[in-house]
Image (cartoon, helix red, strand yellow):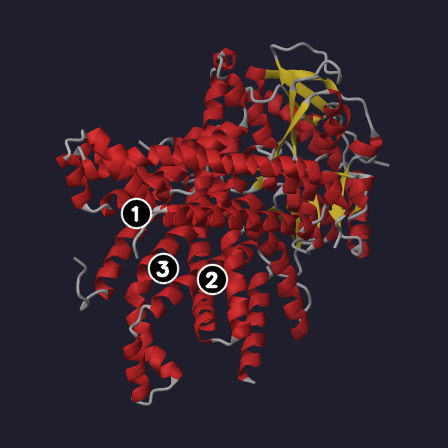
Amino acid sequence: MIPEILSFGDKGFGDELLRGVQFTLLIAASAYIIGICIGLVGSAAKLYGGPVSRGVGATYTTIVRSVPELVLILILYFAGTRGINSLLGLVGVGPVEVNGTLAAILVLGVVQGAYHTEVFRAAIQSVPVGQIEAGKAYGMGGLQIFRRITGPAMLPNAIPGLSNLWLVVIKDTALVAVVGNVELLSTTASAAAFTKRYMLFYLTTALIYLSITLISNYFIGRLETRYRRGQTRLA
Amino acid sequence: MTFKKLLMAAAAALAISATSAKADLVFATDTSAYPPFTSQNAAGQFEGWEFDLMNAVCAEMNEKCTMIPIAWDGIIPALLEKKMDGIFGSMSITDKRKEQIDFSDMYYNSASVIIGAKTGDMDFSPEHLSGKVIGVQGATIHQNYIDKYYVSKGATAKAYQKQDEANADLAAGRVDYLMADGVALQAYLASDEGKACCELKGAVADDKEILGYGVGVGLRKEDTALKDKINAAIKAVAAKGVFEELNKKYGLEGLMIVPPKG
Amino acid sequence: MNWTWFVEYLPLLGKGLWLTIQLLVLSMVFGLILAVPVGLVQVTGPRWLGAIAKAYCTVMRGTPLLVQLWLLYFGLGSVFAAYPEIRQSAFWPILREGYFYAVLAFTLNEAGYGGEIMRGGFLSVPKGELEAARAFGMSPWQVLHRVWLPRAFRNVLPTLAGETVLMLKATPLAATVTVLDIFGVILRVRQNTYLTYEPLFTAAVLYIGLTFLITYAFGHLEKQIPSRR
C-alpha cells in the first residue's frame, strides 16, 4: 500500500523522513523548554523587576513579536554563533563551529521565550491577589510564595497558551529548512527534488505534521483535564 | 560566585556538544542537489564527482572530512562565521568573492550554458531573449551574468534559492530559459524530465570578471596553512590521475578543464 | 556598519515594501471573506458541512504555512510539467508567477485561522439581538448581513488585529517562491554584498514599522465601534 519510494531501507525515503521527524521533534522540544525557562525569567522581570528589567523585557517581547520569524532566525543564526564564540572567549575556550541543529534550537528557543513571557505574565496576573497576600501574611518568602501558591495556581491558566505555543514551535521548525538545517521539511524538499515527485512528498509531509499536531492535541487535552481538576467548570 | 561557575559549566557543555570532533575538517556545499557534482541519495549520504574529489583530497592530506549542506545564499557568511572550514560546492573563483574569502587552486572549470524549451529556437543572444524569463540560482555567477547582459536588454530574471527549484520551474514552463553550469545542466538534460522538455541552446560568451576562473575550495583568508595543504593535495591528486578517473566515472570527458597531470 | 548599499537598493526596497503590503492586504481580505462561511457553517449547520469546515480549519492550523506554500507551488508546478497544454491557456500568465501561489496559500491559511475566529465571533453575539431581528420579519440572509455579521465582526476586531500582524510576519515566506517582497529584496542584497546584519536589521525595522501601522489602524477602527462601558 505504501509506495516503494516511501518505504524504509535503501531504496525508499521513508527512513529519511523518519530521521527528519526525529530532528523536528528534537529541535521543537528543546526550543520549547528553553522558551519556558526564558519565559519564567522574562515574566518575573516584567512583573517584579525594576525599570531596567521591565524595559529590557518589554523591548525583547516587542521586537520578537513584531519581526517575522524568518528574519529573526537569520539574524540570530549568525549573531548567535558570534555570541557563543565571544562567550566562550571570555571563559578562555577557542572559537567553535556551532552545530546547525544546536543553532536552530537556540534561535527558536529565544523566539519562543518572548511568547512564553507573555503567557506566564498573563497567567501570573490572573492569580487572585488575596492568595498571594495570605502567603505573605504567613511569612513566606518570595520564592516560597511562587513555589507553593503562584506556581500551582497559574499553571492551569497558562496551559492553553503553553499548548498553543507547542503547536507553534512544531510549525516553526519548518522555517529552519530555509537556512539549510536538517529536519522534516528540508529532508522532504531534497527527496522531492531528487525524485521529482513533488506532490507525493509534500502531501506526505503535510500529513506527518498534521499527525504530530493531532497527537499533541490529544495529550494536551488530557493534561488540561488533569490540571483543571478541582477547579469549578466554566458553564 | 556559584552563578559564574554555572555559566562556565554551561558554556563548556555548549562547547563540547557543539563541536563534532575538532580534528575533522568540515566542508560545506549547497543544500540543493547539484548532480553530477554533489547530491544526496536515498540513504541521505552525499555522492558525486565533487564529493569523491573531496574524499581523495582529504585522504591525501591525511584528514577525516565531512560534508554538510548550507543554504547557498548564506554560505559565504557562514564560512566567515566559522561554521565550517571550507566551501567545497562548485564555487567559482571571482574577484568579487576574493574580496571576502580566499580560494584554493582551481580544481575544475566548465562552460556556462543556456538551456531552454524544445519548442523555442536556438538563438540565445540577449536581444533575442528580450521579454523572456530566465531562471538562475541566487548568489551565483550566472545570476550576475544574466543581470549584466540580459536584463539590461529587457529580459526578466527569476532567482531561485536552489538550482533544482530552477530546473523544476523550467520543466513547469514558469521560466523560458535557464543559465547555469554546463555540466550540471547536461546532467539535468539527461534526466527524464529534462529530456522531455528542454534542450541545450549553447554556451555563453566568456566574461572572466563575472564568470570567474574556474571552481576552487572557498577558505577564510587567514587559513593560509589549510590553503597550502589543500593546494598540495590537489596537485598530488592530479598527478595520480584521479581527475581522469572521476571524469570517466561520471561521463564528463571533454566537458571539464581540470588541473594538469604534470 | 556598512550602509553604502542602501541608496543603491532603495528603489528595489520600495517595490518590495509595496509587494509585501499587497500580499498582506489581499490575503487578509480574501481570507476573511472565505472565513465567514467557514465559521458560520460550524455554528448554524448542517452538521456534515460544519464537520468539513472544522476539518479544513484543523488541517490549515495543523500544518506549517511553508509546507502549504511549497506544496502548492512545487506540487502544481510538477503538474504543469506533465501537461504542457496548460501553458496555452489564458490563466498561464498568472499561474507562472510565484505571487499567485503566495496569495493563494496565505488566503487559504488565513481562512483556516479566520474560520475559527469568526466561529467564536458568531457565537459571541447575544441571542436576543438575533431573535429580535427575526421577530421583525427579517429573512435569514437579512439577519446575517444586517445584524449577525457586523456584530460578530466588531466583537473579534482585536483578535483580527493580532491575526493581521501574524499574517504580516508570514509574508517573508513568499520570497522562497521567487517573490521579491521586502525579504526577497533583502536576500538579494545579502547575496550581492555578503553583508549579514545591515540588510537584516533594515528588514526588521521595516516590519516593526508595518506592525505599528497595523496596530494603529486597528486601534482607530476599534474606537469607531460604539460600546457603552
Check disc 1 and report its element: helix, strand or loop.
helix
**Tag nearer the camera, 1 or 2:** 2
Q: For this view, does A177 lie left or right of residue A150?
A: right
State how far apart marks 3 and 2 are (Cα).
11 Å
| Residue C203 appearing in the image | yes
Residue visible at 67% across and 9% down in the picture: B121
Visible residue check, residue A107: no
Q: Which mark is residue A214?
A: 1
User: What x and y, as percent, mark residue B145?
Assistant: 75, 29
From the image, tell me which residue sits under label 3.
Answer: A162
Q: Chain of mark 2?
A: A
Taking the spot 47% from the left edge, 42% from the top edge, the residue there is A185
Q: Residues within 10 Å of mark 3 (few under 14, many from 20)?
A: many
| In the rendered image, the vertical position of residue C131 relative to residue B4, given as above or below | above
Q: Is residue C3 left or right of residue C220?
A: right
Q: Pick the residue in front: A151 or B140.
A: A151
- Dot placed on the residue nearer the N-terminal end, 1 or 3: 3
In front: A136, or B77?
A136
Q: Are marks 1 and 3 in contact (CB under 8 Å)?
A: no
**Nearest to viewer (mark 1 / mark 3):** 3
The residue most toward the right is: B262
Task: Report helix, strand or loop for mark 2.
Answer: helix
Instruction: Say which residue label 2 marks.
Output: A113
Mark 3 chain = A
Task: Say which quarter of the image contains residue C51.
Answer: top left
